[in-house]
Image (cartoon, grey):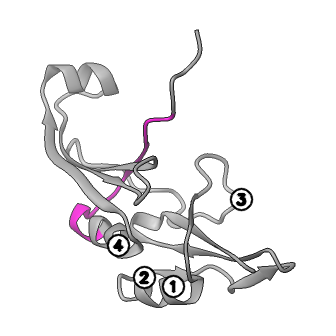
Amino acid sequence: MTIQRMDNVGIVVDDLDAAVAFFVELGMAVEGRAPIEGPWADQTVGLTGIRSEIAVLVTPDGHGRLELAEYLEPVASEMSPPNPPPNTVGLHRVMFAVDDVDDTVARLRGHGAELLGEIADYEDVYRLCYLRGPAGIIVALAERLG
C-alpha cells in the first residue's frame, strides 16, 4: 500500500489570527477554521486536555494546504532557542512559488516578516529568499525567471 497524497503541513503558532493574516497576504485562502478538543483529539495527539483552534489554508491551485494550530490548553511550549537558524534539525521551511518575490516580501513585511539574508538570483532561473514569518516559521519564496 502506498500513500494517496500529502494532505497538509501542520504548524503550531502562538497567534492564529496573525498567522492566518500572514498566509492570506501571501495568497492562500482560508478553507476552514474550527475549535479542536475532546477525547479523540487527546488520543490522536498524545496530550491530555487539548483545547485548540485550527485554520486550514489552501494554495490558489488547490493542491497545497497548511494547518495552523494555536494551543489554548495545554499551552504550547516555546521553541528553544527562539527563532533557530535554518540549519536546525527538524522542519526546515515551507517554500512557495510566487509571481514576484520583491512585491511579496514588501507585502509580508507589513505582517512582521523579516528576511534572513538577502533576495538572491540563482543563475538566470530563480529569484529566491528566506524570511521569518509568524511563530518563527521560515518561509522560502521562489520566483521563476525568464
Residue 146 x, y percent position in the rendering: 75, 80
As measured in the structure, the alpha-carbon distance from the residue carrying label 3 to the one carrying label 4 is: 23 Å
**What residue is shown at x 45% (from left), y 80% (from top)?**
113
Q: Label 2's element?
A: helix
Determine the secondary structure under disc 3: loop
Q: Is residue 15 above or below residue 71?
A: below
Q: Which mark is residue 22?
A: 4
Residue 33 position in % (x across, y down): 17, 50
Circles 2 and 1: CB distance less than 8 Å? yes
- Residue range in magenta is 6-18
As displayed, is residue 91 above or below residue 13?
Answer: above
* Neighbour tally class for label 1: few under 14, some 14-19, many 20 plus, Cα within 10 Å: many
Mark 3 closeness class: few <14, some 14–19, many ≥20 residues within 10 Å: few
Residue picked out by circle 1: 105
Q: Where does label 3 land, which residue?
A: 87
For the point 12% across and 26% down, the residue is 38
Name the N-terminal-most of marks 4 and 2. 4
Mark 1 or mark 4: whose residue is earlier in sequence? 4
The local crowd at label 4, few if under 14, some if 14 to 19, many if 20 or more residues have their Cα within 10 Å, is many
